[in-house]
Structure formats: C-alpha cells, structure tokens
C-alpha cells in the first residue's frame, strides 16, 4: 500500500486490485485505518462481464478494530424508526465505478466489502481510497 499525505489528504491508493467477483468475502474485504481522518472517499470499480450490480458494504469500529458494527440507514413510519444494514448497490451493464464519501471522524477503522451480484471469475473488482484529515 502506498500512502502519501498532501495538504491533509491521505491517499491509500489501490487497496484491492482486480479481485474476482466470486472470490471469498475475505479476498473482497479491506480494513482501513481512519484515525485522525474526517472523511474517507472510496472508489469501487467493476470490470464487468456478467455481474448485474456493484455492491459495497461498510462496517465501522470505535475500538481500534477489535469490534465492528454495520453502518445503518433508517426509515421512519408512524414515528417509529426502523434500522437496516446499509449497502450501496448500483445496477451495471458495463464497466462502472461508484464513489462513496463517508464521514469517519468518530471511527478508528472501517471495513469495506465489495461485490459483484451474479459475477464470476471474469468480473473484476477494484477498491481505491483517500481521506482528509481533521
């Protein structure tokens, strides 16, 4: 991993490079140390052959990476909030990248899992990241 700090920017570079969409989850997962960072930008990319969607799931740690909780979204109906694990998903019919900007000031680490729904060994996933310090 190449890192450089330029004007408060931490460039993590390419963290996952051309990983098969049907690889084991551990091969499609990256843990990023975000201590001292305010915001982290992720670029998830799929070089597509058969996959129908590019997906990104992020969990966060408050305790230096010992435990992780899934980032949540909330819908409210009738005054009751319902939480759901947040997954970013983008339908794809060609090579495609998505950028996710995530506030991370309260976290020590984030765990990023990328996937390609219905993808196989020829669908390739790439993950890049950079952050801006507090």
Image (cartoon, rainbow, N blue to C red):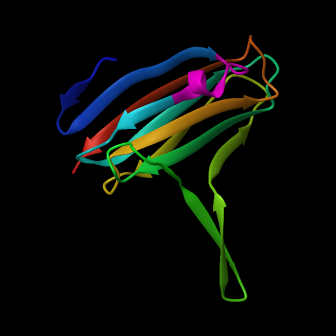
Extreme residue toward the left, this view: 7
Residue 95 occupies which quadrant of the picture?
top right
Extreme residue toward the top, this view: 122
> Between 71 and 6, which is closer to the camera in this rendering?
71
Position in image of residue 1 (x %, y %): 34, 17
> Between 5 and 78, which is closer to the camera in this rendering?
78
Extreme residue toward the bottom, this view: 78
Residue 10 occupies which quadrant of the picture?
top left
Position in image of residue 43 (x %, y %): 50, 32
Residue at x 35%, y 52% (from the top left corner): 107
| Numbered range of the magenta stretch | 20-29
Q: Is residue 133 above or below residue 85?
A: above
Check if residue 25 falls in the magenta segment: yes
Residue at x 32%, y 39% (from the top left corner): 131
Position in image of residue 56 (x %, y %): 61, 39
Residue at x 30%, y 17% (from the top left corner): 2
Report the side of 114 relative to 49 (left or right).
Answer: left
> Between 9 and 68, which is closer to the camera in this rendering?
68
């Amino acid at each position: 991993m190449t890192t450089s700090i330029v004007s408060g920017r931490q460039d993590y570079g390419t963290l996952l490079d051309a990983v098969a969409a049907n690889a084991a989850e551990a091969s499609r997962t990256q843990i990023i140390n975000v201590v001292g960072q305010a915001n982290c930008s992720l670029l998830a990319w799929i070089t597509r052959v058969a996959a129908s969607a590019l997906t990104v799931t992020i969990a966060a740690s408050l305790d230096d990476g010992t435990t992780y909780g899934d980032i949540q979204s909330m819908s409210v109906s009738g005054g009751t909030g319902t939480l759901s694990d947040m997954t970013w998903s983008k339908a794809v019919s060609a090579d495609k990248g998505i950028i996710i900007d995530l506030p991370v000031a309260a976290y020590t680490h984030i765990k990023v899992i990328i996937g390609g729904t219905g993808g196989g060994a020829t669908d390739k996933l790439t993950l890049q990241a950079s952050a801006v310090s507090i």
